[in-house]
Image: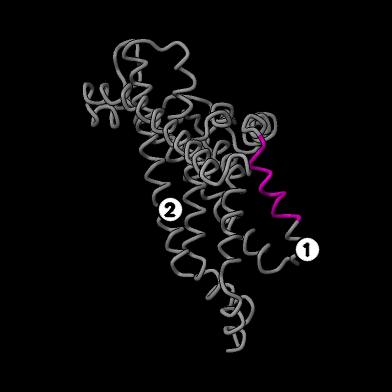
Amino acid sequence: MSLIGEKGVRRILSITAFSAISALLLIALFILTEGLPFIFRYGLHDFLLESDWDPQTGKFGIFPMVAASLWVTFGAMVVGAPLGVAGAIFLSEFVPKSVMRVVKPTIELLAAIPSVVYGFIGVMVLAPLIRTQLGGPGLSLLAASIILGIMILPTVISISIDSIQAVPQSYREGSLALGATTWQTIHMVTVKAAKSGIIASIILGMGRAIGETMAVIMVAGNSVRIPESPLDSVRSLTANIALEMSYATGLHRQALFATGVILFVGIIILNSIAIVALRKRVYKK
């Protein structure tokens, strides 16, 4: 440290930070450069709202995959958001701190499990169960929603716990002193005070669900169709890119990059909303 000096350390950290930012900007620039010309040529309206995806005949409508991505994400939030928030409340308010110090890092480690492992469990366990009990092919929108709902739990639980624990203890003590029960205090005081952070955790989980690829490829069935039932096989935007990019050329390749642009913009919007919600939580402190 003495050899480098404080200014040297600052320069190294600055170079590292700018390198990371530059890499992200270059990736974004590459995707936009490859995808935007196709969108301008084909038309954003036709690209987003047409239902025919047949690259061999020059049809590049991604509406079935947009609908599938939205429905899978919605299903994942129905599964993951209530469970995640409820788990965060239970761990924050009812579990002893000694247990909490062990359980929380364990839950966060679930985020490190490769998505292919979740997909494998979905193929071997969940899909046959759905096929036996509910019918259909098993590899379906429902299976993808359940798997993604489980995958976003670490994100929702971890950020929600941090938000709930950031609520001053005096809020709880004041509510209990006024005669409120423990549940009334949690419901009317603690959760409301941590609302912005909880919403941010749900939005970040939604971004994770939209951007997931491998698990969705394995359990969704990959049929290019507008889903009419939770038991239908579907193909998401990310799955379409991963499945077809290896052999795509010409306009087909450009259309896949344009699909990436749509995903990129959507996830940026979701992350921006989450950042705004987290800032509100910080300002309220």
Count of number-bearing discs:
2
Q: Is residue 148 above or below residue 53?
A: below
Residue 163, x across and y down, in percent:
55, 62
Q: Is residue 59 left or right of residue 20?
A: left
Give amino acid for label 1. Answer: Ser
Type of secondary structure dominating the magenta stretch? helix
Label pair 2/1, CB-CB below 8 angstroms: no
Residue situated in front as seen by the camera: 28 or 56: 28
Q: Which residue is mark 2?
A: 275
Q: Residues within 10 Å of mark 1 (few under 14, many from 20)?
A: few
Q: Which mark is residue 98?
A: 1
249 magenta-colored: no
Residue 65, x across and y down, in percent:
40, 30
Residue situated in front as seen by the camera: 85 or 155: 155
Q: Is residue 25 above or below residue 96?
A: above
Residue 81, x across and y down, in percent:
54, 53
Q: Is residue 51 above or below residue 13?
A: above
Residues in magenta, as a range = 102-113
111 magenta-colored: yes
